[in-house]
Image (cartoon, rainbow, N blue to C red):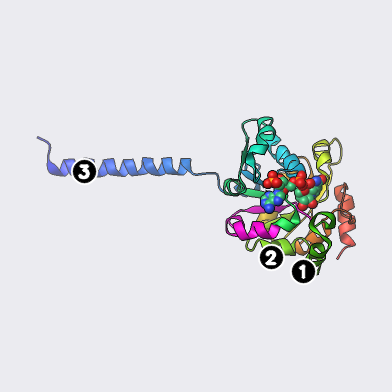
């Protein structure tokens, strides 16, 4: 007959082994560390705005091997876009794209940014990186609105005001959507992407993502410098990294 101490010993050993196995399973099942520390491993990306610019940029992220949720207030409209991009792409609501992404990319009319913040600032503040591609444009957002953004420090500081706590980097603000696919990974010297941000980790992740999709990031300064990253300014358009450094050096 088996003694009670021996049975107790067996039970303790079983509980100990089962606990270790469960711990290993739980660790393996964890989602990738948000941001993946700019290691080049796949990052989940949520696109808020999947129009011309958001659609083109998201496509480059998918082609670089990142899972992307493209969003719309009418996600059914994105069926064609995601079907053409394969299993890494899917469509969802704005809320779903934000929940999905380790990184969130915002490419919407700038006038919609405040409303986005009111609905989602808390969730966006949890992300390792929020890339702000959006620009205040008078013909779209209205003269008075654009003037008011300028008076508050310009795009960058105002994005931070609308999305409190978010780790924002402005990028891709003035490269036309129709040119992105052509310019990505171009032969010879890469096209530079001026970026502005205050958070070192967010900047590192943005730099890594920008290189992966075939451009060269150039940090031009803190988020306050984001006001220079809009179309129609010296940094707007297509420049080499050296040109961006030179232009940025003359700005303040
Ligand atoms: N086009 C370019 O070449 C280019 C280049 C650089 C930067 N940008 C900037 O990128 C932004 C988008 O420009 P775009 O040309 O891509 O515009 P677009 O083609 O008109 O697309 C706008 C996108 O914003 C979404 N959107 C609009 N209002 C929204 C709201 N309240 N909440 C959530 N999503 C909203 C729309 O989604 P729905 O499907 O829900 O309507 C749509 O996906 C602008 O700020 C622009 O300055 C554009």
Instruction: Determine if the C-beta at disc 2 is less than 8 A from ligand 1.
Output: no
Q: Quadrant of the N terminus?
A: top left
In the image, the segment drawn in magenta is: 113-135
x and y, in percent, of residue 251 in the image: 88, 63
Task: Find disc 1 in the rendering and name its residue.
Answer: 152
Task: Find disc 3 in the rendering and name its residue.
Answer: 9
Question: Sequence order check: which comes first, mark 2 or mark 3?
Answer: 3
Task: Find disc 2 in the rendering and name its residue.
Answer: 161
Q: Label 2: few (<14), some or many (≥20) within 10 Å?
A: some
Residue 152 appears left or right of 117: right
Question: Sequence order check: which comes first, mark 1 or mark 3?
Answer: 3
Q: Is mark 1 on a helix, strand or loop?
A: loop
Q: How far apart in space, not on screen, are marks 1 and 2 (Cα)?
A: 9 Å
The residue located at (70%, 41%) in the rendering is 58
Residue 201, numbered label? none
The residue located at (83%, 39%) in the rendering is 178
Q: In which quarter of the image is residue 214?
A: top right
x and y, in percent, of residue 81 in the image: 69, 34
- Residue 91 visible to the viewer: yes
Q: How far apart in space, not on screen, are marks 2 and 3 (Cα)?
A: 60 Å
Judge whether 77 appears above or below 160 on screen: above
């Amino acid at each position: 007959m088996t003694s009670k101490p021996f049975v107790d010993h067996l039970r303790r050993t079983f509980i100990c082994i089962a606990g270790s196995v469960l711990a290993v399973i739980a660790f393996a099942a964890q989602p990738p560390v948000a941001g993946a520390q700019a290691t080049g491993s796949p990052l989940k990306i949520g696109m808020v705005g999947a129009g011309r610019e958001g659609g083109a940029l998201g496509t480059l992220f998918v082609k670089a091997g990142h899972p992307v949720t493209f969003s719309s207030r009418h996600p059914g409209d994105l069926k064609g876009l995601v079907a053409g991009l394969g299993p890494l792409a899917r469509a969802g609501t704005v809320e779903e794209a934000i929940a999905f992404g380790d990184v969130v990319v915002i490419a919407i009319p700038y006038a919609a940014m405040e409303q986005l913040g009111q609905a989602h600032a808390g969730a966006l503040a949890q992300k390792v990186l929020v890339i702000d591609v959006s620009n205040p444009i008078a013909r779209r957002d209205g003269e008075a609105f654009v003037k008011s953004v300028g008076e508050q420090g310009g795009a960058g500081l105002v994005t931070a005001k609308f999305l409190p706590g978010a780790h924002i980097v402005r990028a891709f603000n003035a490269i036309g959507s129709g040119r992105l696919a052509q310019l990505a990974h171009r032969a010879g010297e890469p096209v530079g992407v001026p970026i502005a941000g205050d958070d070192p980790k967010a900047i590192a992740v943005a730099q890594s993502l920008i290189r992966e999709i075939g451009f060269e990031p150039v940090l031009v300064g803190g988020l306050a410098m984001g006001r220079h990253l809009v179309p129609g300014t010296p940094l707007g358009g297509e420049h080499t990294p050296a040109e961006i450094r030179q232009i940025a050096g003359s700005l303040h």
